[in-house]
Image (cartoon, rainbow, N blue to C red):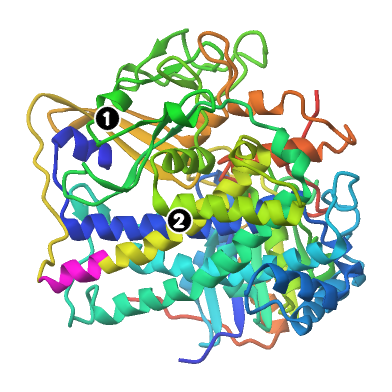
Amino acid sequence: MRSVENALQLEIPLNAQYIRNLIMAAHGVHDHIVHFYHLAALDWVDIVSALKADPKKASQLAESLSNWDQNSVKHFKAVQDRLKAFVDSGQLGIYANGYWGHPAMKLPPEVNLIAAAHYLQALHFQRRINMVVSILGSKTPNIQNLAVGGVANAINADNQSALNMERLYYIKTLIDEVGSFVKNAMLVDVAAVAAMYADWTKIGAGVTNYLSAPDMPMDTKGTTFALPGGYIENADLGSFKPIKSFNDDFFKNGVKESIKHSWYKGDWNKHPWDEATDPNHTGMKYDAKYSWVKAPTFNGKPAQVGPLANVLCMFAAGHAGTKKYVTDMLNTISAVANAKVGPAALHSTIGRIGARAIRCAVLYDECTNQWNHLVENIGKGDVKTFNAPKFPSGEIKGVGFHEAPRGLLSHWSVIDGGKMKNYQCVVPSTWNAAPRNGSDQPGPYEASLVGTPLANPEKPLEVLRTVHSFDPCLACAIHMVDAKGNDIIKVKAL
Amino acid sequence: MQEPTITILGLGNILMSDEGVGVHVVNEFQKRYAVPEYVEIVDGGSAGLDLIPFIEGREKVLMVDAVNFDREPGFIDTLENEEIPIRLTQKASMHHLGLMDVLCIVRMSGNVPHELCIIGIQPKSLELGLDMTPEIWDKKEALIERVVQKLREWNIPCALQSPQE
């Protein structure tokens, strides 16, 4: 949509920008909570070990690290009892599955219990913040309120069937409910896990060119943004160069994709506007073509995208909230690890997980900020949410970008006489999961796995830790129950 | 309105041919049968954690889904309570979070329904496509009949509706 708006050089009403921003922020908070607790955490947290924890010690430890109000002895005991009943029921084969009891699991039982309790609490909070998305977007996932030129939300403070004051204040209530969990549970849990797996601050850096989009536009033209973005080369924060607007040539001209190692017809390295997507599967040949993913480059080099890229860019740009949360997290890690941990630790597998929690807190604050902007703007009497697009005859081109939960997303469109002539998406997982590019440089996943130590090659938990740290977007498609409960994916260490 | 205590959940991805069988069957059931207010009929699609509110704290949950029984396409069976594999599976992506995980999380939260039942069918094709294979769609009546039977077993009234004008 932004790519079409960009092609038309269409201005977006302020209310529509704020509503979109609020949806993006709430969605990001939801996504980051779910990613950490319900996907990544189980690579580091051994739930079975939590059964051996002393709830009193767990409570003391948790309360020494934060003032989250659901860390009582009573609460931890109740969670432990439920986990015990769950494991004792025997039907579950819980000991046999996952990587629980794996030699690479290092957390003490009390920390495992704290994380297990917050894993269950997180279910509630991810749902509450996601309600903001569903109220404004009509449903989630796949919101329905977006339109080229604005949003399809009618604003009328007193009308039952429009976005009114009651709905706006309900949204505010939902936002307020979630803040303490993000700041006092999630940020602290992630810091504790990072501190206790300090060796993982030296593993999994991979590609350290970082690319991130500025987002949360604050004017109708998209020239100022609440959250900065840009490009950092070779882990050097001093090299940060900002992307300044939706029209910035620095970004527009920098992106290309190669299919030298991807299953598409031909072998080329092209700008997205000039590309085609003609699938041509030729089998698994690691020295030739071996992936459905194209290999994007920025100014000829592979780049990592995602929360780490975003946090490093915002940090380098001097974004105040980001600086605060990065500093707080490094201080907590240093305190728990009893050793000074600096920003260099972020270029790692653990750094990607830490950055996601930091970004979650930044986005959380942005929920509140964007809500305030929206209500203030409506208060001025502005209820406009849509500018109708007009398509010219002849060819126009546009690019739209967005800093999505998994990183920089860009859509590229070529429109001829109001009809779409070419449309290419360069999505976050394309950057990170890219095969080798036109000059045979590996993408971020590949590069990050080189040199990863494996405690047990039959159970390569360490590989999963690094791949999960990128929050891959793969196979949304099939969720079939296997009558015997077999895993649908297999990880092979080659 | 009365709070629902029973859920009938159609599961699957209707973009992947037979994978969507559960959704199609439950939609068809809903067209034909009237159920009491305390029964909620849900198109669960391939939602992951979003299914939790429709399972957690309910008395009984009846699901229809494509299931790999390692049998011939069209084979139908019912899995109940302990027979349902409930566990956290290995995932590459958050998008792999499926029913087994959701049921496991509900169990760990402590609010498991008293009765869980999956009516499953072995799919033939999981290729991209809106249409189910004829072999599987031919089993639609048998699957709807299983849903009706199960509801009767649970003493939940369900009656054929008169065709709507």
Number of residues whose C-alpha sits closer than 10 Å to that of mark 2, classed few (under 14), some (14–19) or many (20 or more): many
Residue A20: % across, % down: 30, 56
Q: Is residue A17 left or right of residue A473?
A: left
| Residue located at (82% from left, 50% from top) | A98
Chain of residue at mark 2: A
Residue A153 placement: quadrant: bottom left
**A172 lies above or below B133:** below
Whole-Å distance between the Cαs marked 1 and 2? 31 Å
Q: Residue at x 68, y 84 (%)?
A: B59
Q: Is residue A335 above or below residue B73?
A: below
Quarter of the picture holding the N terminus of chain A: top left
A384 relative position to B110: left or right? left
Residue A404 % position (x, y): 43, 45
User: Residue placed at 33% from the left, 63% from the top?
Assistant: A369
Regarding residue A378, the answer to whether it shows in the image is yes
Label 1 crowding class (10 Å Cα cut-off): few <14, some 14-19, many 20+?
A: many
Q: Amino acid at mark 1?
A: Ser
Which residues are the magenta region? A373-380
The label number, if any, that marks residue A362 in the structure image? 2
Is residue A35 visible in the rendered structure shown here?
A: no
Q: Is residue A96 above or below residue A2?
A: below
Is residue B47 on the magenta stretch?
Answer: no
Residue A18, horizontal then vertical, whole percent: 26, 59
Query: A53 or A2, which lies in front?
Result: A53
| Residue at mark 1 | A413
Sequence order check, earlier mark of 1 and 2 = 2
Quadrant holding the C terminus of chain A: top right
Dot 1 lies on which element? Answer: strand
Amino acid under label 2? Val
Question: Which of A266 and A166 lies nearest the eye of the viewer?
Answer: A166
Chain under callout 1: A
